[in-house]
Image (cartoon, helix red, strand yellow):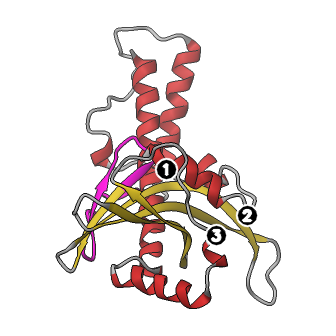
Amino acid sequence: MARLIRTAARTLFSSFSSSTPPLLQSRNSITSSFLFQSSRPYSTDNKITKSPLEANILRIIDKEIDYQSEYAPPHQPETRFHSFTVEDQPGEQWMIMRGKYDDIEDIKLEVTMFDGYVTVPKLGDDATGEDVRLHISFIVDVSKGDGGENLEFLCSAWPDRLEIQKVYLLRGEKMLGRPYMGPDFRKLNRELQKRLREYLDARGVNDELSFFLHEYMLNKDRIELIQWFGKVKSFVEK
């Protein structure tokens, strides 16, 4: 995954302003019982006496978990989306989806968590201010299983649509040097753009998938945040 994520970030955000999304800084993320079966609550009865500072940290974490758990508890990650299997990567900022097309092609998606955003005016006659639209980068790898080059698409997933950024060929999992990544997709012939979108759509990569990815990553972000709370708490408790 690391072979192209940095390239994706540089490529996708050269055309619009991006930074760490506010939702990643203060996500309304919360606990679910399956996430913390192994964690133990802090108690003044613990044999190891904690300093006032450590005890305060543990109390704050407990309050944060309690608060978040009442707002929007995460659910078990989805393991399928239509013909794709979904492979979560716990503790990581990405996941994998796999599928097949026509029993000949292997389709693999490598998907980041939210990696940027744009602000847009709020809709409505009386609306004021701006809304945040989160962005997800992902790579679609199409392999014919013949040991030759794979056709890859570097894409953006917005909440309501999918955008292709680049189309290029890559031999297997190797990325030597700096291969030519093709022109900006928007500069291609419009008819070719249309046909390449249809090519992905036939393989299940479309606007509906973009919506799924946003729902999935919102949930994953909650899971990762609450697990982070648990790890910090466990360390301080030692």
Q: Quadrant of residue 184?
A: bottom right
Distance from Cα at disc 3 to Cα at disc 2: 11 Å
Figure check: 126 above or below 41: below
Is tag 2's residue or tag 1's residue first in the polypeptide sequence? Answer: 1
Secondary structure at numbered mark 3: loop
Identified by mark 2, the residue type is Ser
List x then y, in percent, for residue 46: 35, 15
User: Which quarter of the image is occupied by the C terminus?
Assistant: top left
- Residue in view at x 51 percent, y 34 percent: 61
Q: Is residue 94 magenta?
A: yes
- Residue in view at x 26 percent, y 38 percent: 37
Distance from Cα at disc 1 to Cα at disc 3: 16 Å
Mark closer to the observer (3, 2)? 3
Residue 96 placement, left or right of 166: left
Magenta stretch, main secondary structure class: loop
Identify residue for label 2. 15
Q: Nearer the viewer, residue 129 or 208?
A: 208
